[in-house]
């Protein structure tokens, strides 16, 4: 399995359109809690106790809608914030079922950015309760995962999801003019930043932020990377601004405020008016 396809599988699974999710009923029959011990092991999953000796267990976070986070290691500093980029190791599986996605074959952490629709709703909500260095699991009810329909033959209908996750690090952004932020998640010490009229060739995923969050474009669908001349039009201003700190072989999320993207007009059928956008870019060459 190539690095591209392993990472893309996560993005596609998380970004798929879910019909009827809001009306889906929680299907938690695979998850069992036993109040008689600190934890209980079933055929399905090992769960922590909600309380110990009458005191709430601070290694458990439980929401009324069924979303649950359990920690093996829990820190108190550097909590994940909305819009952060975090490097994670993860394994996603159907509750009481098989693993359907993981970064283990890559042998290195992968980047996740909040507030762009990159993850399942419950995955993102649970991860926002975690901190840098945490290890644990996010238990996601079907209504916040793939809903009544499931996903193809990979995830059954009405399936709860469990994500075992390690928060390896939070990526510190580089803040540039006009509010553009660059979150480099793969860096190269050698190489030079682009100069005017150099041709930058890269693959990308493009996302809307906020209420309209979700992927709206990517270069892989054209089976070829995209190119443009630096500081010579061709793309939104914010992409030129972000690319000024990039080198060949580097990867980053470039977060672009609406004023440096498509502004009050938006981009027909893709980007609503006054919407911030994010490019997840992988730079192939700068020539």
Image (cartoon, rainbow, N blue to C red):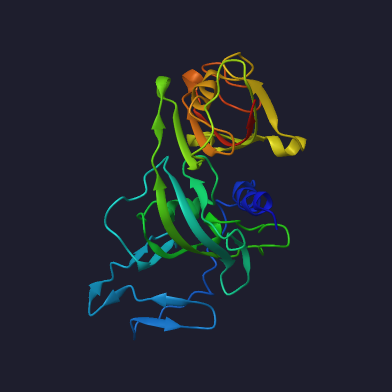
Lateral position of residue 104 relative to residue 67, left or right: right
Lateral position of residue 15 relative to residue 121, left or right: right
Quadrant position of the N terminus in the picture: bottom right
> Does the rendering let one see residue 268?
no
Nearer to us in this view, 15 or 157: 15
Q: Up-down: is 204 above or below 81? A: above
Q: Up-down: is 82 above or below 43? A: above
Quadrant position of the C terminus in the picture: top right
Q: Up-down: is 26 above or below 34? A: above
Q: Residue at x 65, y 62 (%)?
A: 157
Lateral position of residue 125 relative to residue 118, left or right: left
> Does the rendering let one see residue 61?
yes
User: x, y percentage for residue 98?
Assistant: 63, 71
Q: Residue at x 72, y 58 (%)?
A: 152
Q: Up-down: is 16 above or below 106? A: above
User: x, y percentage for residue 47?
Assistant: 42, 76
User: x, y percentage for residue 246?
Assistant: 52, 31
Work out which residue is located at the far right of the displayed protein and give it: 223
Nearer to us in this view, 214 or 87: 87
Q: Residue at x 60, y 56 (%)?
A: 146
User: x, y percentage for residue 111?
Assistant: 51, 48
Work out which residue is located at the far front of the displayed protein and give it: 190
Q: Quadrant of residue 231?
A: top right
Q: How many marks?
A: 0
Work out which residue is located at the far bottom of the displayed protein and give it: 36
């Amino acid at each position: 399995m190539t690095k591209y396809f392993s990472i893309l599988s996560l993005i596609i699974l998380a970004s798929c359109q879910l019909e009827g999710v809001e009306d889906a009923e929680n299907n938690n029959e695979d998850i069992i809690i036993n109040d008689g011990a600190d934890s209980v092991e079933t055929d399905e999953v090992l769960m922590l106790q909600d309380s110990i000796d009458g005191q709430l267990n601070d290694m458990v976070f439980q929401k009324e809608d069924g979303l649950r986070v359990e920690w093996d290691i829990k820190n108190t500093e550097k909590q994940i914030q909305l819009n952060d980029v975090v490097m994670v190791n993860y394994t996603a599986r159907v509750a009481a079922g098989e693993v359907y996605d993981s970064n283990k074959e890559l042998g290195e952490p992968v980047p996740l950015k909040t507030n762009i629709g990159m993850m399942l709703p419950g995955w993102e909500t649970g991860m926002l309760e975690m901190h840098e260095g945490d290890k644990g699991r996010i238990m996601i009810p079907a209504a916040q995962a793939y809903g009544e329909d499931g996903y193809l033959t990979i995830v059954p209908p009405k399936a709860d999801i469990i994500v075992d996750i390690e928060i390896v690090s939070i990526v510190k952004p580089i803040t540039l003019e006009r509010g553009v932020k660059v979150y480099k998640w793969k860096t190269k010490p050698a190489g030079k930043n682009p100069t005017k009229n150099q041709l930058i060739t890269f693959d990308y995923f493009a996302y809307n932020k906020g209420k309209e969050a979700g992927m709206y474009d990517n270069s892989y669908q054209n089976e070829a990377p995209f190119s443009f001349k630096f500081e010579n039009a061709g793309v939104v201003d914010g992409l030129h601004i972000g690319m000024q700190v990039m080198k060949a072989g580097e990867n980053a999320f470039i977060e672009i405020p609406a004023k440096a993207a498509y502004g009050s007009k938006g981009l027909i059928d893709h980007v609503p008016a006054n919407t911030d956008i994010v490019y997840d870019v992988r730079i192939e060459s700068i020539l």
